[in-house]
Image: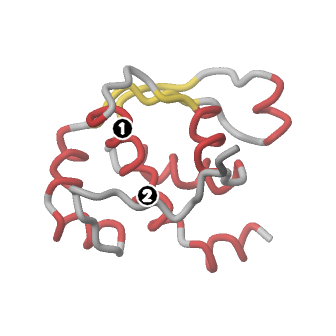
Amino acid sequence: MFADYVITMGVQKDAGELLLFFYNELINNGKKSIETKEVLKETKWESTRLNLAHNYLNELGLLKGGGGLPDAALIELGAKFFFVTGLSPRAIDVIENEPKFEKTFGFEVNIGVFKFSWSKTKK
């Protein structure tokens, strides 16, 4: 099942969308920090999907922040606890340079309009 996820969903694309989400929340909306629970709530992704995308960004050195011990709810979901407090200068460069973003994450981005593949359900 894990291998099926990687092949069909695309960690690289998920990571690109996650980076755009962090950029939008931290830069455009002025948030000080974003943590695992908030991302899970917003994206509705399974924890494995989020863990893979976050690890990809972290390994590229694009995120500032940290981790720690997850609470019981995250442990039950299999999600690792993280918080993102900022983006590295390289992350900003990749996001704001559309050809670099496409080369890094495999899809085009329009910095003026963010469209995420997940949908937020309105009540």
Q: Which residue lies furthest to the front in this view?
A: 123
Q: In this view, does 105 lie above or below 25?
A: below
| Quarter placement of the N terminus | bottom right
> In the picture provided, is 16 more to the left or to the right than 37?
left
Mark 2 residue type? Glu
Q: Mark 1 points at which residue?
A: 63
Residue count near mark 1 (Cα–Cα under 10 Å), binned few <14, some 14–19, many ≥20: many
**Residue 95 coordinates in the image, percent (x, y):** 23, 54
Circle 2 SS class: helix
Q: Is residue 119 above or below residue 31?
A: below
Residue at the image point whose x is 66% and y is 36% from the top: 80
Mark 2 or mark 1: whose residue is earlier in sequence: 2
**Residue 45 coordinates in the image, percent (x, y):** 66, 53
Check residue 17 in the rendering and tell me which mark sits there, or answer none: 2
Residue at the image point whose x is 78% and y is 42% from the top: 78
Mark 2 vs mark 1, foreground winner is 2
> In the picture provided, is 64 more to the left or to the right than 51?
left
| Quarter-of-image position of residue 111 | bottom left
Please state which of residues 38 and 59 is positioned toward the viewer in this rendering: 38
| Quarter placement of the C terminus | top right
Structural distance between the alpha carbons of marks 2 and 1: 14 Å
Residue count near mark 2 (Cα–Cα under 10 Å), binned few <14, some 14–19, many ≥20: many
